[in-house]
Image (spheres, rainbow, N blue to C red):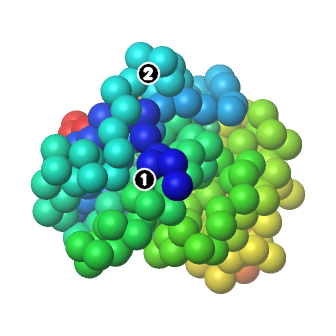
Amino acid sequence: MTIVRYPIVEVFESLQGEGTHSGIGATFVRLAGCNLRCSWCDTTHSFAVDKATTYTTGELIEAFSFKQPLVVITGGEPTLHDLGPLVRELHNRKKYVCIETNGTNPIPIEWGINWITVSPKPQSGYTITCPADELKYVVDDEFKLEFIRFDLVKQGRVFLQIESGRLESAKKAYDMIIRNPDLHLRLGVQLHKVVGFE
Ligand SMILES: C[S@@+](CC[C@H](N)C(=O)[O-])C[C@H]1O[C@@H](n2cnc3c(N)ncnc32)[C@H](O)[C@@H]1O
Ligand SMILES: Nc1nc2[nH]cc(C(=O)O)c2c(=O)[nH]1
Ligand code: SF4
Ligand SMILES: [Mg+2]
């Protein structure tokens, strides 16, 4: 059996700044590489796989302490990598494992991820090919309510996330929520950008 090596951009501790678990202490694992190029992506530094240092699961666990209750696997697009071995080891350490994905790849049930955040993208026609616990749409100028897949998640688990630093996006999201009370939409604010942490 081949041992999986993960191209790592960064591993850091912070508070989960987005979605349902906002405010909880987390270790973030940011993997390199992405299959999309969103015009407003705030993480373009994560695209280059060749520049990233690769770690096996064992090396990752040894190099970083994973003290926080949550682990958020993100990127880049983390579903481009076989996450099974990493998630298994994090479960051995009693971690609650979350993933941030653009939804364009399947997520094998065997990986056993505890919480799947899908943020569908205009570049992929808002395709969703994996299960989702919450949906997080970035409200850009093109975003419309018709794009939202309410059928995939429980009521109250759709976030309209403000495109960072854009007041027009905040206003548009606010209006959509207030004008559509039956949809149980939630505003998504990137806590870390407001407060100024990683
Ligand atoms: C950088 S992405 C990495 C994970 C995955 N590739 C994805 O897009 O979901 C993490 C989260 O940041 C969001 N995001 C990226 N750029 C943003 C921006 N300028 N404003 C608000 N959210 C943004 C994405 O939609 C996603 O929910
Ligand atoms: N604090 C903090 N919370 C986050 N939640 C999702 C993030 C991401 O980039 O995927 C992120 C991030 O970059 N920082
Ligand atoms: S899918 Fe995620 S990481 Fe990739 S470009 Fe879009 S926001 Fe950035
Ligand atoms: Mg981020």
Q: Residue at x 39, y 24 (%)?
A: 52
Residue 45 image label: 2
Q: What is the C-alpha distance between the residues marked 1 and 2?
A: 16 Å
Q: Position of residue 159 (x, y in %)?
A: 58, 61
Image quadrant assignment for residue 91: bottom left
Q: Earlier in the sequence, mark 1 or mark 2?
A: 2
User: In the image, is 2 to the left or to the right of 107?
Assistant: left
Is residue 135 at all visible to an observer of this figure?
Answer: yes
Q: Residue at x 32, y 67 (%)?
A: 90
Q: Amino acid at mark 1?
A: Ile
> Element under label 1?
strand
- Which quarter of the figure has residue 80? top right
Residue 38 in the image: state x and y as whole percent: 66, 29
Tell whether circle 1 marks a residue whose Cβ is less than 8 angstroms from ligand 2.
Answer: no
Quick check: 190 left or right of 67?
Answer: right
- Depth check, front residue: 88 or 3: 3
From the top left corner, tell me how far across and down residue 180 is, in percent: 72, 69
Res 158 quadrant in image: bottom right
Residue indicated by mark 1: 73
